[in-house]
Amino acid sequence: MSGNLLLKDIPSVDKLLGSEELEPVVDAHGHTRVRETIRELLDQIRSDLLDGNSSEVPSIQALSDEVSERITRKNHGTLTQVINLTGTVLHTNLGRAVLPGNALDAIATVAGANSNLEFDLASGKRGDRDTHIEALLAELTGAEAVTVVNNNAAAVLLSLNTLAAGKEVCISRGELVEIGGSFRIPEVMEKSNCRLREVGATNRTHLKDYRNAITDQTGLLLKVHTSNYEIRGFTQEVSYREVSELAGETGLPFMADLGSGTLVDLEQYGLEHEPTVQEVLAAGADIVTFSGDKLLGGPQAGIIAGKKVYVDAIKKNPLKRALRVDKMTITALTEVLKLYLEPETLAERLPTLRHLSRPAGDIETIARQVEPHLTKFFKDVASIDVVDTHSQIGSGALPLDQIPSFAIAITPVANSDAALQAISKAFRELPIPVIGRLSDGQMMLDCRTLDDPGEFIRQLEQLQQDHLALHPDH
Ligand SMILES: *Cc1c(COP(=O)(O)O)cnc(C)c1O
């Protein structure tokens, strides 16, 4: 029968809505939503019939099931938890730092009720949202004043715009970095209404280069941490202290964008030294900017710390209002900072540091615990081996520092890219998707960041192999 003739067999929206089959769905989601979903579905069936893509009208039962499934699918949302086994601890695409439990509890409390976000409980008057973190951050960094914005890109933009709008900003050629494709110092400079004044050569910059660049047009001296690359060989960089002395001599402010920024000496955790916020402030930087969700291990935020006169000016910039953080960020950041007050337990309680400082031996134990389950699961499809590998910090921190780790290497028997892609896809389709790293024809699951091997194994057991289409004979 032609599609046109079948159209009359399509039930009406009201008939379907009133059907017994859809009663529980209407009870759960209400008339409005179910009617809208029915309408979409019937429209699709109508056009499929007319286009010849279908030659029958589904039963009421089949239509009801489809309505229910569509609502469930939509409710599922797209942002979801994943297990990051890429070996990159702070993976920007996978949400960077994992928050500690005390921060999660505090978010639930503060977000589920009213709070004194901008209310001074002592005086009963209007307060300032920055006060909640300012004292803690000042104590931890030694800064006179602190403010927080949405991310470090915003911190740099706002600081440049406040301190040097309409003026020139001197920066070494070797520090004109691009971070993640969308944050490039020259472009941020332009959007801040500042003029870039490049100083020195790519590999070598001397103090006299800064000195010679300073004119009555200069508004700021800037150093940017070259987060995601390193210049090696015949190089010369001017230290924070030297630039700060020059700034003092000339009466100009000096700002340092640390990017990742850390509050602790990473050497104690077996990592390479990274200049800490405290060191750079002590070396004389007037303003330091850094991220909340990189090495600090907190929520997405940009922290601006330094001299009170500059921080006060930054807070008064109308852009600050547009870039400010919400109460959930403030409370999460506060809880993370509190952990830094108790350094003995920091690496245990803060997931980012716990992952970064995990001994390779412990990681190997986890890999060996998971290995037999994967071997069983992939029996004819892939071989499973525990191998040593290197993790990296990620998010531009210490890009060349590779931390010894252990991974499970999954090598498809079919030795083809298609087989590898199928395995990788199967992991992404798990109830909690698992993201690994593909390299040299293998899928690597770096166990440094595997917190709950039991959960990982249970997921595998739930799976039906044929559902994954991994076995060529299925
Ligand atoms: C990561 C980074 C930024 C941007 O920080 P976000 O918190 O991602 O906005 C800026 N500058 C440097 C040097 C960085 O490494």
Image (spheres, rainbow, N blue to C red):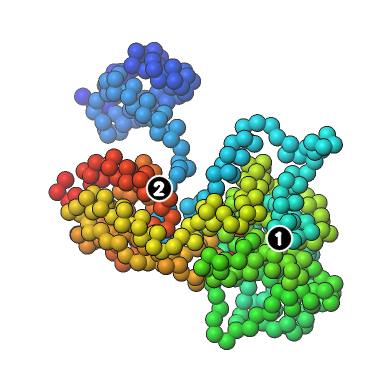
Compare residues 243 and 136 and report the one nearer the observer: 136
- Mark 2 in CB contact with mark 1 (< 8 angstroms): no
Q: Secondary structure at mark 2?
A: loop
Give the residue displayed 75% in from the left and 84% down from the top: 208
Q: Residue at x 28, y 59 (%)?
A: 410
Q: Which residue is painted at 85% across and 72% down in the image?
A: 251
Q: State the residue in front, 111 or 416.
A: 111
**In screen coordinates, is 111 left or right of 469?**
right
Location of residue 209 in the rendering, given as x and y in whole percent from the top left corner: 73, 83
Could you give the CA–CA distance between mark 2 and mark 1, rounded to whole angstroms? 34 Å
Task: Pinpoint residue 203: horizontal percent, then vertical percent.
Answer: 60, 82
Q: What residue lies at 17% left-to-right and 51% top-to-bottom?
A: 472
Q: In the image, ligand 1 is in what quadrant? A: bottom right
Q: Which residue is mark 2?
A: 452
Where residue 412 sits, quadrant-wise, is bottom left
Mark 2 or mark 1, earlier in chain: 1
For residue 295, side relative to residue 450 (left or right): right
Residue 314 location, x and y as percent?
78, 55
Residue 9 sits above or below residue 313 on the image: above
Q: Amino acid at mark 2?
A: Asp
Task: Kindly indicate the quadrant of the structure image that contains residue 226.
Answer: bottom right
